[in-house]
Amino acid sequence: MIKPQYALERLQALTKDRDTYITTEVGQHQMWAAQFLKFNSPNRWMTSGGLGTMGYGFPAAIGVQVAHPKATVIDVAGEASFLMNIQEMSTAVQYRLPVKVFILNNEYMGMVRQWQELLYGGRYSESYTASLPDFVKLAESYGAAGLRATNPGEVDEVITEMLNNDRFTIVDIAIDKSENCFPMIPSGAPHNEMLLGPDDEAKKPTSEEGMVLV
């Protein structure tokens, strides 16, 4: 299976010599992008930070592409966040904007699932999406390009094809559905109680105040 960290490492390696701007949606993919993509110039990283604005990345990428028509603009997305403003595909195609949407697709609202797994005893609720569109066919239905990778051996080929394409392109990367993003700090916990990896356990149950924050 494809690990999301690997997909982003390969995206970094294959775009390092390009004039690249990165936007993100919100969730695990956003944090992995912050960890595994490198920026050597200012104003190349557009993200909503801790505001939790699902749907931010795609319209932001459209705006960046208009401002920098010759640059490579990539929206690193989760499949759930991308659905928030998916209608803007029409804008990207109509104005011939070669924005790239790089979806790390785990079929979950990944950060919600991670919290439910680690802090709520695996009580999963409304975090899995069983009715996702076929993103390749969806792209093609708008007259855009759609690509997919389902195993690690396809990742480089798909990224290369995405970068060589001068059309709006969606790349659907099928990643490990159970991969978690670390480090993380449980709601209401201090920084010295952050979880550092999959074998780390919360040092105390999530407080009522912390549950309210979630």
Image (cartoon, rainbow, N blue to C red):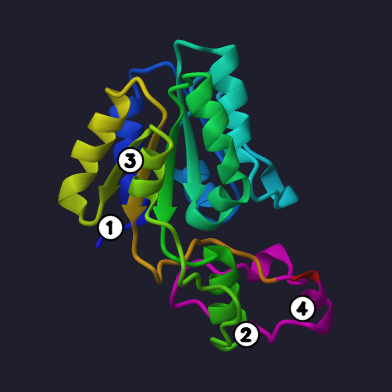
Distance, label 4 to label 1, CA atoms, is 32 Å
Q: Are marks 4 and 1 in contact (CB under 8 Å)?
A: no
- The amino acid beneath tag 4 is Met
Residue at figure coordinates x 55%, y 24% from the top left: 44
Name the residue carrying label 4: 211
Distance, label 4 to label 2, CA atoms, is 9 Å
Distance, label 4 to label 3, CA atoms, is 39 Å
Distance, label 2 to label 3, CA atoms, is 37 Å
Name which of mark 1 and mark 2 comes first in the sequence: 1
Name which of mark 1 and mark 3 comes first in the sequence: 1
- Which element type, helix, strand or loop, lies under badge 2? loop
Between 42 and 161, which is closer to the camera in this rendering? Answer: 161
Q: Is residue 188 magenta?
A: yes
| Residue 38 to residue 181: above or below | above
Q: Which mark is residue 120?
A: 2
Between 96 and 25, which is closer to the camera in this rendering? Answer: 96
Name the residue carrying label 1: 2
Name the residue carrying label 3: 146
Residue at figure coordinates x 49%, y 67% from the top left: 108
